Image (tube, rainbow, N blue to C red):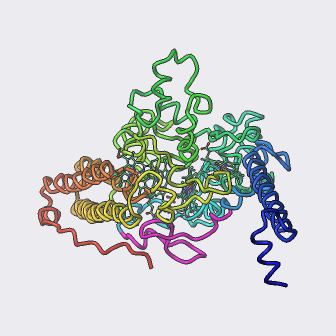
């Protein structure tokens, strides 16, 4: 019977009951499948829209990122990752999880350059954004009185500026440098805004469009716009210059979205001056290069008429310029900036997440992320990309260490000349050369990409640093003062530097 039935079913033209059940089942499965696909598409569309669906209201004064995180959990989750320790050969930080490594211990010539300044007390590797306020509050540099301006780049300060300025944040900013760090930091916490960089610092709370908020940046970029320095990385500045200039350049309305993807970082990753003597200043009035920013500082005067300097070197008395993390400035001189590649392209690359693209808010070294940070543009194997970066950084490192040897020789030579009785007038030329050499060496040492952001410009700046150091020694030798004559005339070979591998 069984065989017969099988036989019949197989050869009958009609559809038997079991087959019907099968087909219905298939149809049902298909229907479920189609529904599932449709549901999936629907969900993904919703997901894509979810950037505009809000569960809680946030405003420009909502500084707690957790509140924003309720609306935008994916960005918030990656933002929280900035509390993770990161490390590459030259990036992230050495030292323990509790405390990043001291740069001034790793490179003793840095400490030598900074004698007479708080940076010779405590100067460490950077780490993730989550730590910025805490690390500032903990630094031993605060054993010297510091200005309230320090908070500009380490805390969620905009509501505080508004309050200080009676509703006008720019006014508040302009008053803030006169406060002590301790007082202003306390006020920030009392107002409930004791947070590191927050969503409102880069985003418009209504539209989530990128915005810049920091007055130091807005004034700095306006200064740059009114100069005649070429800005191949910012076509909007060149457009503004060609216009009637009725209103000052306004990055929030004039800049393209691509430009904003770098400007948001340039609110902080820049060279600046910060003390109770002058408002926080970004030195961009003559352009962004090491040479142009030096020219800006050289033409700046303190209220008492004295020429600008950051500190007098403890051993030589030279009026020194201290450089601070000029990432934006160095990047602006490189091929990536010229090609329109923004900070966020490499440091906040897109992550695919269902149908949406999420910008990775775990801001960190792109070398931990070559796949999304570089291979979107460079169709090369990851190993090859790594090797190219390594070669650029190694060359920069070698030249930098040579510069460290040269500046040490110059400082020691000037010290010896002073001991041998040289007057400040006699040493004037050498002290000016120390200022120029240190500015350039520090510019590349304090910049955090180990030359990558603009390799050829970095090499030029370091080449000049070496030249100015050795010229300074010659200036002392020409004085013909006994021991210094010999010290300066003896050729100093730079030892082959050890690799900067972090423990
Ligand atoms: C083309 C890609 C690219 C662009 C564009 C770029 N960077 Fe970088 N950046 C790098 C690389 C590569 C390094 C070296 C990382 C390392 O050594 O681990 C780096 C290093 C850094 C570091 C130190 C990172 C660390 O882990 O210690 C900072 C800070 C930084 N960049 C900020 C910026 C800023 C601000 C901009 C825009 C003005 C910018 N970068 C533009 C690729 C880029
Ligand atoms: C214009 C923005 C800006 C201002 C103003 C500023 N910082 Fe920073 N600071 C940064 C950036 C960006 C980094 C990370 C890059 C680096 O460490 O080089 C940083 C890193 C640091 C660090 C960690 C690494 C280190 O240097 O030991 C400390 C501590 C610090 N700053 C303290 C201060 C103090 C104190 C002041 C005021 C005198 C100040 N900052 C003012 C932007 C700023
Ligand atoms: C409000 C100021 C501020 C803004 C805006 C800002 N940064 Fe930072 N950034 C800092 C400070 C300060 C640190 C150092 C924190 C520390 O060491 O405690 C830092 C650290 C970093 C680091 C080192 C991370 C690590 O794990 O070692 C990178 C990379 C970086 N920033 C890139 C960027 C990029 C790219 C942007 C723009 C998308 C940006 N930052 C915007 C202030 C800022
Ligand atoms: C240092 C600046 C900075 C901070 C701080 C910041 N973002 Fe962003 N965010 C960006 C950049 C750059 C983009 C890319 C925007 C673009 O290209 O239009 C972005 C994009 C976004 C987007 C659009 C979708 C996407 O992922 O590209 C959302 C939503 C967002 N951020 C949420 C947040 C939230 C929530 C926080 C706080 C937890 C935050 N952001 C903090 C710089 C920042
Ligand atoms: C949005 C596209 C884009 C991204 C992302 C990008 N690059 Fe580039 N890169 C370029 C362009 C454009 C050039 C210029 C050369 C050219 O026009 O072909 C370039 C040039 C370079 C060069 C040679 C120039 C030099 O400075 O020596 C290196 C090396 C390089 N990129 C490495 C990287 C690394 C590493 C990353 C990731 C951290 C990266 N790039 C991310 C577009 C990109």
Q: Position of residue 262 (x, y in %)?
A: 53, 44
Q: Where is residue 111 in the image (x, y as percent from the top left)?
A: 40, 66
- Point 59% across, 76% down: residue: 97
Give the vertical position of 245 relative to 469 (above or below).
above
Q: Can you see residue 187?
A: no
The span shown in magenta is: 80-108
- Point 58% across, 71% down: residue: 85
Give the vertical position of 253 relative to 18 (above or below).
above
Pick whichever, 128 or 10, lies toward us: 10
Q: Magenta: predominant secondary structure element?
A: loop
Q: Quadrant of ligand 2?
A: bottom right
User: Which corner quadrant holds the C terminus?
Assistant: bottom left
Q: In this view, does 119 lie to the left or right of 466?
A: right
- Point 73% across, 33% down: residue: 168
Q: Where is residue 364 in the image (x, y as percent from the top left)?
A: 54, 61
Q: Position of residue 134 (x, y in %)?
A: 66, 64
């Amino acid at each position: 019977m069984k065989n017969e039935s099988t036989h019949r079913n197989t050869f009958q033209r009609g559809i038997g009951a079991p087959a019907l059940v099968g087909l219905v089942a298939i149809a049902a499965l298909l229907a479920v499948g189609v529904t599932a696909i449709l549901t999936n598409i629907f969900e993904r569309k919703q997901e894509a829209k979810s950037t505009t669906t809000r569960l809680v209201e946030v405003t420009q004064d909502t500084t707690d990122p957790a509140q924003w995180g309720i609306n935008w959990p994916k960005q918030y989750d990656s933002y929280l990752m900035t509390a993770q320790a990161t490390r590459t050969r030259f990036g992230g930080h050495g030292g323990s999880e509790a405390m990043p490594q001291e740069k001034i211990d790793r490179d003793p010539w840095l400490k030598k350059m900074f004698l007479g300044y708080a940076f010779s007390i405590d100067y460490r590797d950077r780490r993730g954004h989550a730590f910025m306020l805490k690390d500032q509050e903990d630094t031993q540099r605060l054993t010297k009185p510091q200005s309230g301006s320090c908070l500009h780049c380490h805390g969620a300060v905009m509501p505080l500026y508004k309050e200080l300025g009676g509703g006008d944040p720019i006014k508040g900013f302009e008053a803030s440098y006169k406060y002590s760090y301790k007082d202003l930091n306390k006020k920030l916490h009392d107002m409930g805004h004791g947070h590191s960089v927050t969503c409102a610092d880069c985003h418009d709370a209504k539209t989530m469009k990128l915005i810049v908020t920091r007055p130091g940046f807005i004034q700095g970029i306006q200064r740059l716009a009114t100069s005649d320095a070429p800005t191949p990385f910012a076509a909007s500045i060149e457009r503004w210059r060609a216009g009637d200039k009725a209103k000052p350049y306004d990055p929030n309305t004039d800049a393209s979205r691509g430009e904003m993807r770098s400007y948001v970082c340039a609110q902080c990753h820049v060279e600046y001056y910060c003390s109770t003597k002058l408002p926080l200043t970004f030195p961009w009035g003559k352009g962004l290069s090491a040479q142009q920013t030096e020219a800006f500082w050289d033409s700046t005067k303190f209220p008492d008429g004295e020429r600008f300097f950051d500190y007098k070197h403890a051993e030589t008395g030279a009026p020194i310029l201290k450089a601070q993390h000029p990432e934006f400035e160095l990047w602006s001189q490189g091929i990536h900036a010229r090609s329109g590649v923004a900070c966020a392209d490499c440091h906040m690359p897109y992550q695919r997440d269902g149908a949406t693209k999420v910008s990775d808010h775990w801001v960190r070294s792109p070398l931990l992320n070559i796949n999304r940070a570089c291979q979107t543009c460079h169709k090369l194997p990851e190993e090859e990309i790594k090797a190219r970066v390594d070669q650029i950084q190694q060359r920069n490192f070698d030249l930098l260490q040579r510069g460290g040897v040269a500046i040490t020789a110059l400082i020691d030579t000037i010290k010896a000349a002073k001991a041998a009785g040289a007057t400040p007038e006699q040493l004037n030329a050498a002290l000016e050369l120390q200022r120029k050499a240190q500015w350039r060496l520090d510019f590349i040492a304090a910049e955090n990409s180990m030359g990558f952001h603009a390799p050829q410009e970095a090499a030029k700046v370091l080449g000049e640093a070496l030249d100015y150091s050795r010229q300074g020694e010659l200036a002392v030798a020409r004085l013909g003062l006994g021991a210094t004559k010999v010290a300066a005339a003896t050729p100093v070979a730079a030892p082959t530097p050890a690799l900067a591998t972090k423990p």
